[in-house]
Image (spheres, rainbow, N blue to C red):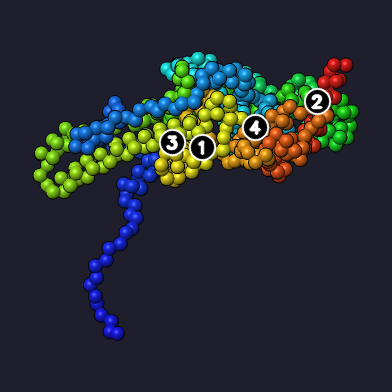
Amino acid sequence: MALGPRLDLRQTQALVMTPQLQQAIKLLQFSSLELTTYVDQQLEQNPLLEVGEAITPTDGGDGAEQPAAEVVDGGDPRALDRALKDESPSFAEDSIDSDFYDNVFDGGADAGGSAARQVRSGSFDDQATNYEELLPSSTSLREVLSSQLAVDITDPAERLIGHFLIDQLDETGYLSADLALAADSLGCSLAQVETTLTKLQTFEPAGIFARNLAECLRLQLADRGGLDASMDLLLGSLDLLAKRDWTALAKVCGVSHDRLMSMVAEIRTLSPKPALAFEHSVSQPVVPDVIMRAQPKGGWVVELNSDTLPRVLVNNQYYVKLSRDIRSKEDKQYIAECMQSANWLVKSLHQRATTILKVSAEIVRQQNGFFINGVHGLRPLILRDIAEAISMHESTVSRVTSNKFMATPRGIFELKYFFTHAVGGSRGGDIHSAESVRHHIKSLIDGEAAEGVLSDDGLAERLQKEGIDIARRTVAKYREAMGIPSSVQRRRDKDALRRQNGKGVA
């Protein structure tokens, strides 16, 4: 068979990802900040785009309105009010003591799960209130230390060293600079820097200019007059203190168990980060993309947050004027491309908003039990469930829920929070979400007595009796993820606390 050139005509099908389709997919998964940045860039590059009062896609003069809110049935405002009154949300306070527990005691006091920390109650009636205006004015740490330096140190060289070391403090008040390098930079001796540092460590707040946690606590105890030999040995064994190995600590310090407990109680009153008392940074809250409200007669209203929606319009009048005045072929082609790009952008923004609203409304419909009963009502949910309910692809739902937040009567949650895997029921009936099981494990641990600390096996048995089919290793995994110590460590902590309370009562 001879080989030769042929000319054939074939018809095939192929999926082509056009640049506009690729960009539309990126728009869908953009957060509100990323979307704002992208739209600003388009406004700079495209002369036919301008900022408007509403999202109005234009196609030959026809416009499309902004997607309206959706109403979801199922909400009982009276039941919601009762649930919020019965719950006592544990606000995650950024207190000094809790930070100290995290650093030294390895997750001691409040190791609650994410759900307990996320539950919040509130309303959206006072959106215009500027709470930053209510914050008291504060003096910075640098100003406080500089004023003390001007009074307590008179030598010009030591003042210069002091200002240099003040600039080397981190946000917690610790000195991270190497003293030898500081001496080389300032052209002085290491002894001069060390002498100045010793004077600076007497400044307020106590514990400032420390180079590690032990030195910080040692400076505070010295300022109180409570630094003795046994306390100094205790500060040298912070690793044992983090493990709560009271027997080894009592042996190292040469004191009784009761004396050791009083020493530990005194350490807990100290500040591991002394500079936090002066730094008042304002935390910016998350701006929700979707707002959910309870209706007076039941049900929910789900609507988009208009503050996060870019307001872009196509200037048709300017396009008509340019088309009439432009003569060259290249310029006409450029203006036509700008018009096509502008129309595509506003339509894509409208489609993005509509998709977010549709997905959010279906999430509210599926997780209605959570909004009424709290985390115990959180049902297992995966992306496929939402995709099938709204006739969309699973990947589209994944992009919509990425970096998007919804404000609810229970707080602000990322849309991804409502998706959780299922844990089967031991009776072959009900299934439970992993998040509700974690919350249940924490509730059992919080309610255990000192003489009845539950092991991982005990927790698994207790959950199985309540209809939750879960293995011991899964209980251990959930417990460790929430930062809760083992049963041995919890029993040791409760025994120490009971002894300390018994001594106080006596």
Q: In the image, what residue type sits under mark 1?
A: Lys
Quadrant location of the C terminus? top right
Residue 3, relative to residue 161: is it above or below? Answer: below
Question: Can you tell which mark lies on residue 497?
Answer: 2
Q: Amino acid at mark 4?
A: His
Residue where numbered disc 4 is placed: 439
Q: Please tell me how crowded label 2 is: few (under 14), some (14-19), or many (20+) other residues with Cα within 10 Å.
A: some
> On the rendered structure, is 247 left or right of 129?
right
Task: Pinpoint residue 459: horizontal percent, then vertical percent.
Answer: 74, 36
Question: Can residue 418 be seen?
Answer: yes
The residue singled out by tag 1 in the image is 416
Secondary structure of the residue carrying tag 2 is: helix
The span from disc 1 to disc 2 (Cα, nearest Å) is 39 Å
Secondary structure category for the residue under label 1: helix
**How far, Cα to Cα, is label 3 from label 4?**
26 Å
> Which residue lies most toward the bottom here?
1
Q: Quadrant of the N terminus?
A: bottom left
Q: Residues within 10 Å of mark 3 (few under 14, many from 20)?
A: many
In front of the other: 230 or 321: 321
